[in-house]
Image: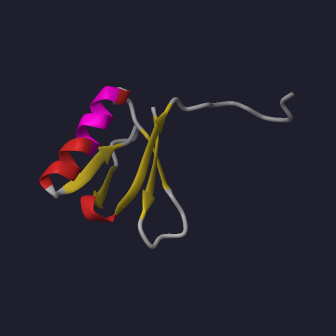
Amino acid sequence: MEVKIGVQYAARELVVETDESSDAIEKLVTDALTNGGALILTDNKGQRTVVPADKLAYVHIGRSVAGQVGFRS
C-alpha cells in the first residue's frame, strides 16, 4: 500500500510503501489524531516514519503502482 503524507509547512510530501491494509492505516491515522500523539508507519524494509499528529495536513492511502514506464493513453 502506498501512503502519501502531507506535513504542514513542508514543501514535499512523504511517501511510504507498506504491507499494512488500508483499514489498518486508517485506524493508525485516526488513533494518532484522536490521542494527539504521533502517526508511526513501518515501510516494506522495516524502517519507521514518525509524524506528529498535530503536523498532519493530509494522508492519502492508495495502491502502489509499480512498473509503469512510458506514455499511457
Q: Residue 27 location in percent, x, y?
A: 24, 35
- Looking at the image, residue 14 sits to the left or right of residue 73; the answer is left
In this view, the residue in front, 32 or 50, is 32
Vertical arrangement, residue 68 with respect to residue 46, above or below: above
- Residue located 21% across and 50% down the image: 32
- Looking at the image, residue 9 sits to the left or right of residue 67; the answer is left
Q: Report the span colored magenta.
A: 23-29
Farthest residue toward the bottom? 9
Q: Residue 73 location in percent, x, y?
A: 87, 27
Vertical arrangement, residue 24 with respect to residue 34, above or below: above
- Residue located 84% across and 35% down the image: 70
Farthest residue toward the left? 35
Does the magenta segment cover residue 37? no
Question: Magenta part mainly helix, strand or loop?
Answer: helix
- Residue located 54% across and 69% down the image: 11
Q: Residue 7 location in percent, x, y?
A: 42, 63
Q: Quadrant of the N terminus?
A: top left
Does the magenta segment cover residue 25? yes
The quadrant where residue 61 appears:
top left
